[in-house]
Amino acid sequence: MRAISVAPAAPVDAAVRAIIEIDDIDFHYGPARALHDITLNIKERQVTAFIGPSGCGKSTLLRCLNRMNDLIDGARVTAGQIRIDGVNIYDPRVDAIELRKRVGMVFQKSNPFPKSIYDNITYGLRIQGEKNKGRLDEVVERSLRGAALWDEVKDRLHESALGMSGGQQQRLCIARAIAVEPEIILMDEPCSALDPIATAKVEELIHELKKQFTIVIVTHNMQQAARCSDRTAFFYLGKLIEFADTRTIFMNPANPQTEAYVSGRFG
Amino acid sequence: MLRVPIAMPVVVETTPSVRLPTRVALLRKRRGWFFGLSGDQFVKYVFQGNAMVSIIVLGLITFTIFKDAVGFLPMNHANLVVYRVAGLEYVDLYRSQVTAHSAISRYLASVRSHQLDILTKQEGLAPAAAMARLAGFDQFANSFADTINEQETLLGTMTDLVTAVKERQKVAEDLVEAKRNLLAARRGATAERAAALQKEVDAITPEVIDFKAEIQPLRALKPDLTKANATQVAAMKALVAVPPKFSDPELNRQMAKFQGFVAGYFTEMETTAQKMAAWDQNRPIGWWESFTAYAFGREWVTASFWQDWYGVIPLLTGSLLISFIALLIALPLGVAAAVYVNQVARPAEQKFIKPYIEFISAIPSVVLGFFGIAMLGETLRRLSQWPALDWVPGFPMAERLNATTAACLLALMAIPTIFSLAEDAINNVPRSFKEASLALGATRLQTTLRIIVPAALSGIMAAILLGFGRVIGETMVVLLCAGNRIQIPDFSAGVGVIFQPVHTMTGIIAQEMGEVVRNSIHYRALFMVGVVLFLISLLINWLAQKIVRRYRIVAT
């Protein structure tokens, strides 16, 4: 087995509250079943990584958490519940718009709007009706500092966001997500299109963000999962194979499939 | 326990197939398929040939149009020269004075009808009694109208004089033309025939008109004009000194306005006299004027016994007015439909709406025009006569067929263009923008209005421009439904201008091209109109391309 460096993760405290409770979830794309009886709890202010080979359902599960799957025709949760802060988010009374304000998302490909950097960051607040210029300025600075981007772009806030490098664009997307002060940030392979240096910056950022936000990250890069996350869930063919502390998953997995995957023997 | 799948190389025993050594295969010559050409080459030449033919044909068309159009300029120059040397311009100066006087007479008539209204409606008089009350005013108006009689007679004399001169000039021109044709026919004819033709040519002696001498009688009328003016001024002043009085303040105000008009007329009379004195028969007409008379000419008058004018402005304003109204209707509908279909509609609705809208463009325009004449014009007119809609400017409309009738149908034709292109533009907005916006907690409406439409704006703008191109180039509908009055629409009517009949550039070409004499000035003037249309289309396409290129978003 290959040696994998595992960051000294925060000691997993059983007393930490579980903010997301995924309870026996089944998910279908039309007739095809994509998730089978997934049950796991995601704890507050921790980084939880979803790993697994392509098509294993990890992104699907992630997109269930802010109901982005609602946009796909024929895609639906067929059984079980997902509770965030104790509320079933698939309850008809739940407003998906409000949910997404609380559960931010960063996508695989950076997708800044074709607007200025400033307008990208303030978009989330403006659609909520915020017009106060002073408050918007403040949020822009705080979010960009939070995303470790402030020093790089503070002189060109009103230039197009599309003129930034790929890594900067991705951090801008993170800044945009934290500008609306969500509770949870979902990251769908945020570094897969970035070079190693930009990746390192984003990973560093994840460490920082953990202090304020609960983070769920999907990644193909096992080193990344090992470096950044506190807990790791391994999925295979739509099933949750193993979910434990990151250290346990990488050093001492209970399941031979997990071991085969994390040691690079398949996937 | 699941087994970990491990890929193992599969070894299968096969006999290797016989194949050419690589060095032979590389140097092997490809066998010709058609006259020694391979399939690829053949297809390539066919397409190249087609493209070349299209380019040559397009080039020829453009060249022919421009060649015929440019020939207009010297002809219009000659046209304007005759207008001056034969004295038509001089007579028109005087005519403007007479026209000004009759305008005042018409104003008096409108005052009279206003008064009649007051008498019958407010005071409740019977028509006969009202007429009797108006007798004094009528007498005043009639004597006022009579003050122009002498001038009108003089104008008639002058008109007859110069018309005769112009007529002779025309005959002389025709003879010169005939002579030229005969000489052309002589070339290549047999000696015998040539001699006969030569004889014919010699028999033709076109008159050389000495314009200076010809307009002497015109100049000789000058003392008469001065005398007539003096009598008229005296007569008018005497009349105006004792104007009829009214009890109604509004009518008195109108009479005061009338006094103002008369004063204005006196000054105009003086300036006209000065202009006529300063008029110089021999002042040359610049080449540039033959162009400006077209490009800025406010009148399009053809086959007139007096003077032909080829000014594009009435047609251009007509075309632009119609296109503007049509776009005003088509733009919100087309863009809104595109946004709806792309962003809101369910797949089933999409499947229905898209082909349905696109089907509209398959309706032949003559059918739409027919519908406009038979149904829409009449319906709109009925609607405009409905008392509850009196507040709408221009209602009730005077003409059944007008700019708006045509514009409604043109809008219908522009909607598919705008819709399809705008829908494409919206569709090309990367999906990731939409996801990013929704993930930030935006509603669907916010996402559409703040992210998707702005991102597609360049495409939408191009769609609008091309819709405009579609509208301004359309012929059949405007020819049938626009009312075809060759006059600059009266923009002083405010918004009501949209209910006036107009003529268009495309319509005039379609209407008149069939009847004009080939290579005549009128024929070439129509080509000039074609050139303006051509340039407008060129401009629109160029702008649309520029907008799309300039604001294209790099899809991320």
Image: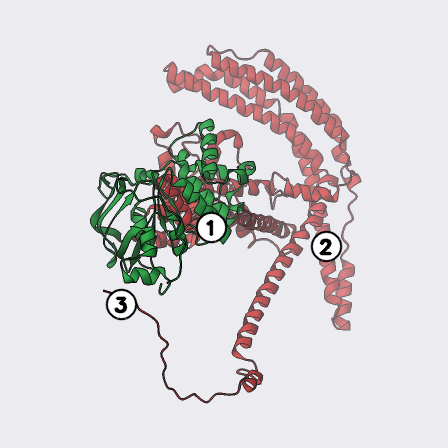
**In-front residue for pair B333/B26:** B26
The colour with which the image depicts chain A is green
**What chain does mark 3 sit on?**
B
Position of residue A29 measured from the top left corner of the image (x, y, whole percent): 27, 56
**Residue drawn at the location 75% of the way across and 26% of the way down:** B223
| Residue B175 badge | 2
Residue B302, can we see it?
yes
Position of residue B290 measured from the top left corner of the image (x, y, whole percent): 70, 44
- Please tell me which of labels 3 and 2 falls first in the chain: 3
Q: Distance between the residues labelled 1 and 2?
A: 91 Å
**Nearest-to-viewer mark from 1 and 3:** 3
Q: Badge 3: how crowded within 10 Å, few (<14), some, or many (20+)?
A: few
Position of residue A163 measured from the top left corner of the image (x, y, whole percent): 54, 46
Q: How many labels does the image show?
A: 3
Instruction: Tell me if residue B207 comes above or below residue B132 in the rendering.
Output: below
Q: Badge 2: how crowded within 10 Å, few (<14), some, or many (20+)?
A: some
Q: Residue under label 1, please give it.
A: A199
